Image (cartoon, rainbow, N blue to C red):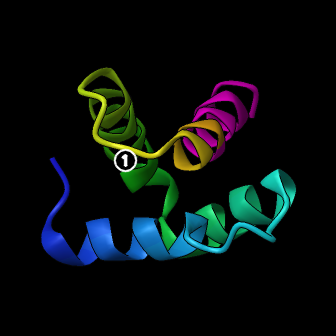
Amino acid sequence: MLNQSELTTLHQIVSDDTKTFESIAQLFQEKFEKFEQFKVGLSLWIMIKQNLLSLSKVWAYFYIIYHLKNK
């Protein structure tokens, strides 16, 4: 799972509702190294499944997961 610092970074990436999905994905790639992205993607999936996120964040996180899958 993610530590508090990683969770805070992830939250900051998607906290601005004016960002596009593309800019969110770009920030995600800048903040998390390639070797960390699987762990972050897994944590995102768990948060989505546990209904721990607002709907706007769910869509942003789904886009990140989609983007990771199609890289």
Q: Quadrant of residue 6?
A: bottom left
Q: Main secondary structure of the magenta part?
A: helix
| 12 left or right, relative to 18 | left
> What residue do we see at 72% from left, 36% from top?
67
| 38 left or right, relative to 5 | right
Amino acid bearing label 1: Val
- Decide which of 37, 24 is in the foreground and name it: 24
- Decide which of 13, 39 is in the foreground and name it: 13
Q: Quadrant of residue 26?
A: bottom right
Instruction: Give x and y (percent) for residue 59.
Output: 64, 37
| 68 left or right, relative to 51 | right
Assign a secondary structure to mark 1: helix
- Location of the C terminus by quadrant is top right
> What residue do we see at 71% from left, 62% from top?
24
From this view, report whether residue 43 is shown above or below residue 36: above
- Decide which of 12, 5 is in the foreground and name it: 12
Q: Which residues are magenta?
A: 60-71
> What residue do we see at 14% from left, 65% from top?
3
Q: Quadrant of residue 46?
A: top left
Instruction: Give x and y (percent) for residue 14.
Output: 58, 64
Q: Is residue 62 magenta?
A: yes
From this view, report whether residue 61 is shown above or below residue 13: above
Q: Is residue 61 magenta?
A: yes
Instruction: Give x and y (percent) for residue 69.
Output: 64, 25
| 18 left or right, relative to 44 | right
Q: Which residue is mark 1?
A: 40
Instruction: Give x and y (percent) for residue 38.
Output: 40, 38
Q: Pointer 1: residues within 10 angstroms few (<14), some, or many (20+)?
A: many
